[in-house]
Image (spheres, rainbow, N blue to C red):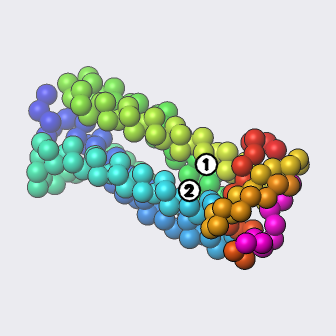
Amino acid sequence: MEFKNSQTVKNLMSSFVGESGVYQRYSYYAKRANKDGFKYIEDIFNETALNELYHAKRFMFLINKELPGEKIMVDQADYPVFYGTTLENLKSAALGEYEEAYEIYPTFANTAREEGFKEVATYFDLISDVEKFHHKRYDTLAQEVERGYFHREGDCDWICLKCGHHHKGPNPPKVCPICDHSEAYFKPICPSGN
């Protein structure tokens, strides 16, 4: 099959547009997490945004390799637009990552294989695996925020993201005794569910 007329090129373009949008949304979500007092979650959103930017880059390069300078029409895709509280943003991100990991990219990989584009299929499979990790991380963070992110039932180790101070207890200190940063800069290092 000719790449230019394939479903695969449309799927790549949809993926490029989608990942570019996710990069922007997660950048906004990071700012909201900071505003809501969740420095660690801000860092996770920023880290994941960068992952998504590189996914978009890979999809663009795969298209450009075969069709440099071409315009690709995409009309079968829809893209979410959502912005809320940190908890709502985590839930939205978890859902989007789930759809990419378990529905969209596996389908796109199968289509690429059927159309004879094995390299593209491999990239969809590899990126799908990354999205599975993103889904699990966002889902876990959403559960932690719902339970009360800065309070655990038992002792937990907390680490200051600025100076590395370790604190053991059900809550981080309100202010780091070393660098004076607020509890927003503490990350829990304890079993999930604790």
Residue 176 falls inside the magenta stretch = yes
Asked if marks 1 and 2 touch (Cβ < 8 Å), the reply is yes
- Residue at image position (21%, 29%) is 117
Looking at the rendered image, the quarter that the C terminus falls into is: top right
Q: Which residue is mark 2?
A: 44
Looking at the rendered image, the quarter that the N terminus falls into is: top left
Main secondary structure of the magenta stretch: loop
Q: Which portion, as a residue range, is magenta?
A: 170-178
What x and y, as percent, mark residue 52?
A: 41, 52
Can see residue 147? Answer: no
- Residue at image position (56%, 70%) is 31
Type of amino acid at the residue the image marks with label 2: Ile
- Residue at image position (81%, 50%) is 156
Q: Label 1 crowding class (10 Å Cα cut-off): few <14, some 14-19, many 20+?
A: many
Q: Which residue is mark 1?
A: 138
Residue 174 falls inside the magenta stretch = yes
- Residue at image position (43%, 63%) is 24
Q: Label 2 crowding class (10 Å Cα cut-off): few <14, some 14-19, many 20+?
A: some
